[in-house]
Amino acid sequence: MTDLEDLYREIILDHYRSPRNSGELETPPAHRAEGFNPLCGDEIVVYLLVADDGTIADIKIGGQGCSISQSSASMMSAAVKGKTVAQVRDLMKSFKGLMSIAADGAELAEPSPSEIRELGDLAALRGVVKFPTRIKCATLSWNTLDQALAELDA
Ligand code: ZN
């Protein structure tokens, strides 16, 4: 195992043991979305409060599931809080890119330094792509956030 893998494992465990932004928000004004990953039994509830200026004023996470799904949700909440909805959509795109597998099953390159800077702790989930069944665990909170964002436009 490389030092980088050790570091990533520590980051994932830290978010699992001490989840950021766990709890609920009053709806309305907050939006609520629920996600479920039947492959693993993971559940994520996202409460999203967007300010008039389009920034994420607050976000809370509920639900239960495996360490990957819960730590990913914690990282996601910390990463999007205070950002604008447009910035969040960009970050979502970067994260889903990180989580995609090469179609030919080729070994993935280590994330580039700029990728790591942009994604912060989220880059720790890169190793998950080696286990295709766990990718849905890692992306569940983002898909649930996507649903909550879609409600904003409704
Ligand atoms: Zn899971």
Image (tube, rainbow, N blue to C red):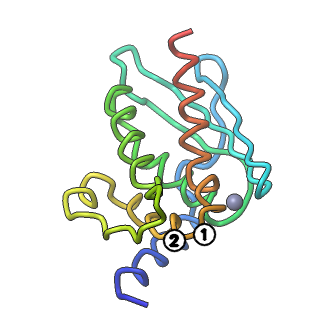
Q: CA distance from mark 2 to mark 1?
A: 5 Å
The spot of residue 125 in percent (x, y) is 47, 64
Q: Position of residue 67 (x, y in %)?
A: 65, 66
Residue at image coords 63%, 32% = 25
* Amino acid of disc 2: Asp
Rendered-image quarter of ligand 1 = bottom right
Report the quarter where the C terminus lies. Answer: top right
Of all residues, the one furthest to the front in this rendering is 104
Label 1, ligand 1: CB separation under 8 Å: no
Image quadrant for the N terminus? Answer: bottom left
Disc on res. 136: none
**Disc 2 marks which residue?**
14
The answer to whether 25 is drawn above or below residue 98 in the figure is above
Q: Picture coordinates of residue 29 (x, y %)?
A: 59, 17
Q: Are the residues tagged 2 and 1 within 8 Å (C-beta)?
A: yes
- Indicate the quadrant where residue 150 lies: top right
Res 17 label: 1
- State the SS at label 1: helix
Q: Is residue 34 above or below residue 65?
A: above
Q: Is residue 77 left or right of residue 46?
A: left
Mark 2 Cα-neighbour bin, 10 Å: few <14, some 14–19, many ≥20 = some
Q: Quadrant of residue 69?
A: bottom right
